[in-house]
Image (tube, grey):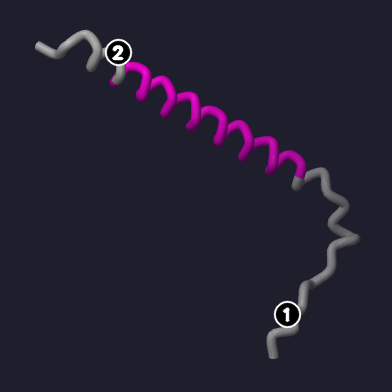
Amino acid sequence: MMPDGLKFLLLFIAVVIVYTIVKVVGYMRKSEQQWQQVDKSKLRDWEDDDD
């Protein structure tokens, strides 16, 4: 049987992981939505000057 402290720690770690995944997915969706709203006619091709 696991000690109560270990159960609490594992539960806390699981909650943090789930929270992080939810936040990342939310930020990815927001980023995609913002990218769709960008006026792409004003975008330019970038040329590197590393010659």
13 sits to left or right of 19: left
Q: Mark 1 points at which residue?
A: 48
Task: Identify which residue, 12 or 23, lies in the foreground.
Answer: 12
Picture coordinates of residue 29, whole percent (x, y): 64, 36
23 sits to left or right of 3: right
48 sits to left or right of 4: right
Figure disc tally: 2
Badge 1 local density, few (<14 within 10 Å), some, or many (20+)?
few
* Rendered image quadrant of residue 41: bottom right
Residue 33's place in the image compared with 38, above or below, is: above
If the image is split into quadrants, where does the N terminus sit? top left
Q: Which amino acid does label 2 sit on?
A: Phe
Residue at image point 79% right, 72% down = 45
Badge 2 local density, few (<14 within 10 Å), some, or many (20+)?
few
Residue at image point 61% right, 31% down = 26
Q: Mark 2 points at which residue?
A: 8
Residue 13's place in the image compared with 46, above or below, is: above
Q: Which amino acid does label 1 sit on?
A: Asp
- In the rendered structure, does residue 26 fall within the stretch colored magenta? yes
Picture coordinates of residue 42, whole percent (x, y): 90, 61
- Secondary structure at badge 1 equals loop
Residue 24's place in the image compared with 47, above or below, is: above
**Over which residues does the magenta segment extend?**
10-34
If the image is split into quadrants, where does the C terminus sit? bottom right
Return the residue found at the far left.
Answer: 1
Picture coordinates of residue 10, whole percent (x, y): 29, 20
